[in-house]
Each structure stands twice: as C-alpha cells, then as structure tokens.
Amino acid sequence: MKKDFLYKTAEKVWEYFIRRDRSGTWYTGQVKENLKRLHPFAGKDREKVYYIQKVRLSMLICLAGFLLAGGLGLSERLQSSVEENRIFRRGYGEGTKKVPLEVWADGKKRYELDVTVGERKYGKEQLKELYEGARKELEEAILGENVCLDYVEKDLTLVDRLSGYPFRIEWESTDYSLIDGTGRLQDENLSEEGVPVSLKAVFLYEDFRAEYLLYLQIFPETLTEEERRKRELFKAVEKAEEESREEETLLLPSESDGEKLLWRGKRDKAWLFIFPATMCVAVIVYFLKDEDLKKEIKKREEQMLLTYPEVVSKLSVYLGAGITLKTAWEKMCADYERGKTEKGSNAVYEEMNIACQEMKSGVSELKAYEQFGRRCGLQLYSKFSALLIQNLKKGSTKLGPLLKEESRRAFEERKNAARKAGEEAGTKLLLPMMMMLCVVMVMILLPAFMAF
C-alpha cells in the first residue's frame, strides 16, 4: 500500500497508541492469534499492516465526514436566505418558495417562522371562473381545521385553485374587519357569541364570471400572549409580502410591539451531526474488521474439517502401499502443488507443506508433526498428529489400520455434518416459504373479496 499521509498517521497511531494498549480494547491477542493462523510466516509485519489498514480506513471515514459537515456548514453561511432584512424572490414562472426564518430582537432569538415568498409576477391577470361542478367541492376545501362553516374559530384555507379544475378563484369578504380575503380571522373584532359573515368566491374563466356566496359564523380563538404576538408578526409579514409582489425583494418588518427586530435565515443544523456520526461509523468499522478476520478463521476451519477425511484416507493408502510416512507426506504435498492452480489453495495442505519444508530444513519429523497439529488448531488434527508421533516413537506397525479406521470415522462425521447442514438450510427456508404462501393466499383471496 502506498504510504500516503493517512498511512503515515495511522502508522504513528499504531506505534504510540494501539501497540501499547493493555486494556484489550484496541489491541487484542485474539487478532494476533488469528493472523498467525492465517499467515504463519508473515511475522509481526502482517499484524502491523493489518492494524494500520484498519486505522487508515477509520481515519478516511472521519475525514470524509469532517469535509462533508464543513462543506454543508460553510454553504449554510455563504448562501444566506436573508440579506439586510430582505428575501430575494424567485424569477418569473419559478414558483413560490418557503423560507425558514429566525426573528431576533435585542440580541435574542424570539421566534421561528416559515414565510412563503411568492415568485415575481407580471401585472394583474384576468381571473378565471370555475365550472358549476366546482362549487360543490368548495366548502369542503376551505374548511381547514374547522368542522363546518357554522362554527369557524380557526383560519380558513381560501384556495385559489381546486384540483382537477383549470380555474382561478378570487375571494371577497363582506367584512374585512372580521375575516380578510385570505381566510385569516381578525380576533380583536370577534365576540364570544359568534359573528355572522359571508364570503364571496368569484370564479373567473376568460370573459365569463360567476359569483358564489358562502355564509359562516365565526368565533374567537383563545390564544396566549406569545401566540398573539407571533400571529401579529406573521400578519405583518404577509402584509409586506402582498404589498411587494411586483418588487424584487421582500422587506421584512424591522419593529414589533416597540422592539427592534433582526431577521436571520434559519440554518439547517443537520451538518453538525454528520461528523460525530461518521466518527461513530469509523469506530464501528474498526471493530468490524476483526469480525471479518474471525469469519476468515471460521471459513478456514470449515475447509480443514471437510478436508480431514481426504488427508487421512490418502495417507492410509500410501502407507498401505509400503511407502514410509515421510515419503507419503512429501508425495501428498507434491500432488497438492501440481493441482493447486486448478483447484485453488487448501489450508490443510498449506500447513502440510509448511511441515514438509521444516523437515527438509532440518527439523525433526516429531517436531514437524507436532507443530502441524498445533498450527491447525483443531482437535481432529491434534489427534491426527498424536497418532503420527506415536508411530514414530514406538515404531508401531498398526498406523495403517488406525488411519483406515480414522478415515472411516471421519467420513461418517462428514456425512453427519452434511446432513445437519441440509437440515439447517431447510429450516432457514421455512420463513421465505411461509411468506410466499401468504402472498399466494392473498393473490387468490383478494379477487374473491373484491367480487362481493
């Protein structure tokens, strides 16, 4: 791996922190043992590279999170939605936009408002009329949070369009001191007994005009002082918005109830959480890398268990043919090397090959077989190496029959393991099969129910 800045930094972290960790949190002996089993001749360099790669990956995730959070934070500051109490509108035909705002007075944040700013408009357009059928849907469409028009205590939603109709609607109130043309109630002029008022909806389409009168009874809504002030401020913003529709900017109110107001665009705080979140991901990835290592070890052990009957059977055949144990061992390693390109590597034969090289370099057979069983790390191979060592020590001639019996037993265990794996696979398939059954039942029963 190329030693870039992150690699060198990770190397420092390994040298001065992880390698000296005695708590077992960042540096564990199990990882060291697993690496040794997977790469017996890689030495300490393999362990060092493994930890450096883990730290480098975690640092890369943290750096990406930091850059993303910083970029979003900078974008929020550079692209402010309000400049000198002005909001720039969208151009002609670009539609309205909703701007989240903060209201500051005397250096303190007082309110948060979502202000809808309309697009720049051309001069007044000729309003369009609705068809007769749209009148039936109008009352339901304008109710808002109210139950009926006979008891209105919250603002109405006076729509300027109805879905499915290519027409515009204009509203007129018979008493603007009670309710304005947008459906907003004027609470200061309402009484507890309720006040009758009527709204006129003007449906316009080209040169055709029709009017529809709606009668309603409005009642005051109970508000706290803070809600009242916020509503008044919102009304002032709406008034300014309405009066400046043909201007390039919307000038927000600079004073309310004797307080000077400072408006700021409400910033999205999501970027503040990105970097901590990526740090958490980096830590999780650091520890998940060890889980990947454990999976490699498990895969290796499964392969060794499946290969055990084959190894014992081959060695038994060679010994039965009169070949010595060492020669049979070397022949099995040579056969493996010739077919390795086609069949791929096998952990057992790799360990046997290591033992073969040790014997060629001067290590005794006893020591080589003993280390072979220890490196494999499985009880089967420990027992296997013990049989080989016992044969060498006592000069027993019964090794061949013992290996035949061990081979027979190993094949039986392999068949049992295969049967167990098949049963487990069948059990895992139960849930998908049940889900498929439910889907089929729904497909069959649903048309039957819909037919009634």
Image: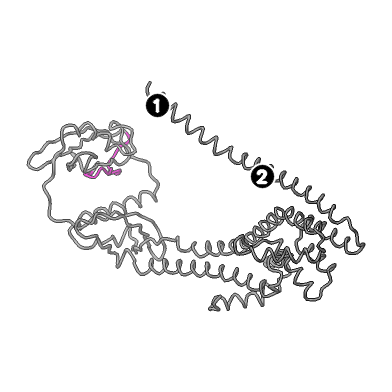
* 178, above or below 216, in the image: below
| Residue 189 in magenta stretch | yes
Figure quadrant of residue 31: bottom right
Residue at numbered disc 2: 421
Along the line of sight, which residue is nearer the eye, 322 or 429? 322
Q: Position of residue 346 (x, y in %)?
A: 67, 61
- Quadrant of the snapshot with the C terminus: top left
Q: Would you say residue 338 is visible in this rendering?
A: yes
Q: For the stretch drawn in magenta, what is the main secondary structure?
A: loop
Mark 1 and mark 2 in contact (Cβ < 8 Å)?
no
Numbered range of the magenta stretch:
180-192
Chain-order first, disc 2 or disc 1: 2
Report which residue position mark 1 lands on.
Answer: 447
Which amino acid does the dot numbered 2 rest on? Ala
Q: Residue at x 22, y 31 (%)?
A: 136
- Farthest residue toward the front? 321
Q: Residues within 10 Å of mark 1 (few under 14, many from 20)?
A: few
In this rendered view, identify the residue nearer to me: 371 or 33.
371
Q: Residue furthest left?
A: 207
Compared to residue 285, the image places residue 186 above or below, namely above
